[in-house]
Amino acid sequence: MSDEQSIGVIYVEDDDDVRIGGVQALELAGFAVSGFASVEAADAAVRSERPFIVVCDVRLRGKSGLDWLTDLRRLDQDLPVILITGHGDISMAVQAMRNGAYDFIEKPCSSEQLVSVVRRAAEKRRLTLEVRSLRSALADRQGIEASLLGRSPQIQEVRRLVSTLASTNVDVTIYGETGTGKDVVARCLHNHSGRRSGNYVPVNCGGLPESLVESELFGHEVGAFTGATRQRIGKIEYANGGTLFLDEIESMPLSVQVKLLRSLQDRSIERVGSNKPISVDCRVVAASKANLLELSEKRLFRADLYYRLGVAFIELPPLRERREDIPLLFEHFTLEAARRFERDAPILDEQTMSALLAYAWPGNVRELRNVADRFVLGVLDGKTINKSGLGGADVSLPRQLENIERSIIEDALRRKQGDVQATAALLGVPKQTFYDKIKRLGVNVDGIREGSNLRAGS
């Protein structure tokens, strides 16, 4: 089924010859069209659940197109309504545009003009309905799903691990590239654990001066060193009864790793300048961009600390390996940014979405969030997206071509609800060649098929 056929057209015109000609022109262009001679006859059709757009003459016997526009706007303010006007009705049509009409066409009009306007309206309608589906899916998310968004198998496995581990007291190590959401996963583990009433204490191990690391982690007593004029409670002690999140733990100095290991083994700390042990009951969640086992083998990370922390592992996939999650994540970040900046959430156009899907995302989910902020602020769209740093010169030409090819295939699969054979036919590619491309590009057909089923059922 084509995009034109998926969005129906309700065509209202009381001149039989004009109506028959308009319906035929649209049907030849691939649209499913229902023709009516009056608003009263068409009114029941617009209350069906099928997605559609409206083409209506302004002057009709019975209720006019303008009066009907008001009713349609109450029914669905995003419904594209195209008005057909006579020469003397232009000023009236302009006022109708201000009242929410999508466009108007002046009689007599060519078939090409009619089809062109209807096709643009249908594309807008399709995008609007897709955004509604995404927002509905976001609104239905609860618990862990509301924090760890996505439909890809990779993120489903992350949610399963978080759900399994959250209720335990086991220490967890999270692996992932910069921007993949390691802090989000750590907070999720805390928020869905029995420690949720305690403190969640994040520590960026890579952002602490070596001279202050011990004081930050273990605290200090008055007079412990020059400038220590007050007692300080360290991060580990502050996390008592809660969760300690050690981000970028691979960057922690080896000398501090020794003391951290002892604290984890004994579940007690000593403040700098004190010999008194203080019992601490906290869960430790560590995060690293690098493989800690490999670092320990190179003696860049203490092996005994690795084995102390290495009880349970969660690996976060980079965004480029779960591209089917980009539309849902981007819509979520767009809604967040709209609330934060007190602006309306714009609807994503086809050109921008294609650019988002084709981009390599070296900054992962964090970069996607920043792009959504710029989109809401009006400084990013499909025409400027590449000039704004997406898909730039840092990505090789073969990689860019692969990204574009993957994006085209994934988009075609979505249109065909994950039907590989139908998609191959749509793209004009032999079935075996298409299967080879899917395998080479790492296209997740099952995830796309599941997403299509979810949209169909929402």
Image (cartoon, rainbow, N blue to C red):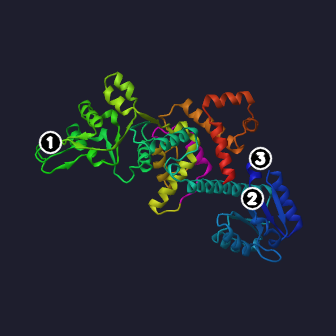
Q: Is residue 442 above or below residue 145?
A: above
299 falls in the magenta region: no
- Residue on which the image places disc 1: 274
Q: Which residues are magenta?
A: 345-364
Instruction: Work out whether residue 265 can be spotted.
Output: yes
Under mark 1, the amino acid is Ser
Which is in the foreground here, disc 3 or disc 1?
A: 1
N-term-proximal mark, 3 vs 1: 3
- Nearer to us of marks 2 and 3 is 2
Q: Position of residue 195 (x, y in %)?
A: 38, 49
In the foreground, 123 or 87 = 123
Q: Of the residues under marks 2 and 3, which one precedes in the sequence? A: 3
Q: Are marks 2 and 1 in contact (CB under 8 Å)?
A: no
Vertical position of residue 396 compared to residue 238: above or below: above
Front residue of this view, candidates 379 and 368 = 368
- Residue at the image position 79 percent from the left and 68 percent from the top: 44
| Residue where numbered disc 2 is placed | 50
Which residue in the structure is indicated by mark 3?
1
- Residue 349 within the segment the image draws in magenta: yes
Marks 3 and 1 in Cβ contact (< 8 Å):
no
